[in-house]
Image: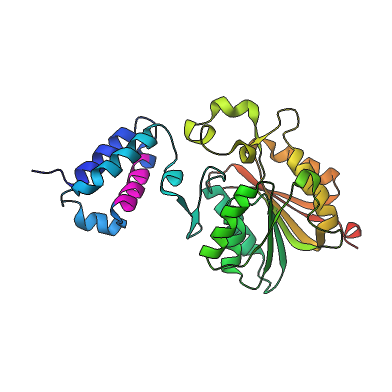
Amino acid sequence: MSETINSYFNQLVNNLKTIYSDRESESIAFLVIEYVLNYSKFSYSENRSQSFPETKKEILKSIEIRLLNSEPIQYIIGEADFFGLKFKVDNNVLIPRQETEELVQLILTENNAEKLKLLDIGTGSGSIPVSLKKNRNNWDIYATDISSAALIIATENAKENNTEITFLQDDICNSVAFNSDKKFDIIVSNPPYIPRMEIDKMHNNVKNFEPHLALFSPDDNPLIFYQHIAEFSQTHLNKNGTLYVEIHEKFANEVSELFKNKELKNINIINDINEKARIVKATIKSFLSC
């Protein structure tokens, strides 16, 4: 008797538990079955007792080998879920995180204006601006990244999700994309914020596969990107506009102090769902916005 879909699923979960938690292993296994068999979780439930298709066994095995080498499932299947949308991803862009969904939700919750102008700095896959545009179609949204390869992915994601975003290549440490008279109501960024010295503490699926350009900040100046974002905001954020940044939990106070020294005000640290400091928001002092 041939093995069932359920037996293959359980075997994959057990093998993945050697490198992932129980919950992660099951979640990844569902994504694999969905990808290989074109099943939803409901379809899996309905067909779990059926024989696993002979023609799909080689595909499943090759994916399992890559997974056990710690390659992220999102890179293997070429897409990631974020804020209810699908995003194309490869190793030129970070895999969008749940914590960043909270950043998107915060912006949507706090900003109900029908029209405003927003900039995402360091857009990667485009998950932040595309998700915002999908929920606020009348917003005028721009996004920048230093990586031309990342911008190709982001542009494709905007197109696939039927959103219109203006993408520009730019280095926030030496920004030349916008004239000084270009103003935004919201500036948002999830910049590289992990000190390179922490690389040995990271899981192999992150440090061996995700782009270091988008992950790490210099050990001798871990807040460098926040410094340049704050300085950029001084000249490009409208009066009463808001800056939102995602942060490393251990640098929350340091980022807040940096923003204060850069003449930002109304500075707030916001915790994520796990009660870790994750977002800092601030506004520009009016005398710098005139």
Residue 188, located in which quarter of the rendered image? Answer: bottom right
Identify the residue at horizontal 63%, vertical 41% (top origin). Answer: 214
Q: Is residue 289 magenta?
A: no
Q: Main SS of the magenta segment?
A: helix
Residue 250: horizontal and vertical position, in percent? 66, 35
Magenta segment boundaries in residue numbering: 25-36
Residue 105: horizontal and vertical position, in percent? 58, 59
Residue 279: horizontal and vertical position, in percent? 65, 48
In the rendered view, tell whether residue 22 sits above or below residue 153: above
Return the residue nearer the eye: 190 or 275: 190
Protein image colouring:
rainbow
Q: Is residue 193 left or right of residue 230?
A: left
Return the residue nearer the eye: 119 or 186: 119
Identify the residue at horizontal 15%, vertical 49% (top origin). Answer: 51
Q: Is residue 50 left or right of residue 127?
A: left
Return the residue nearer the eye: 59 or 34: 59
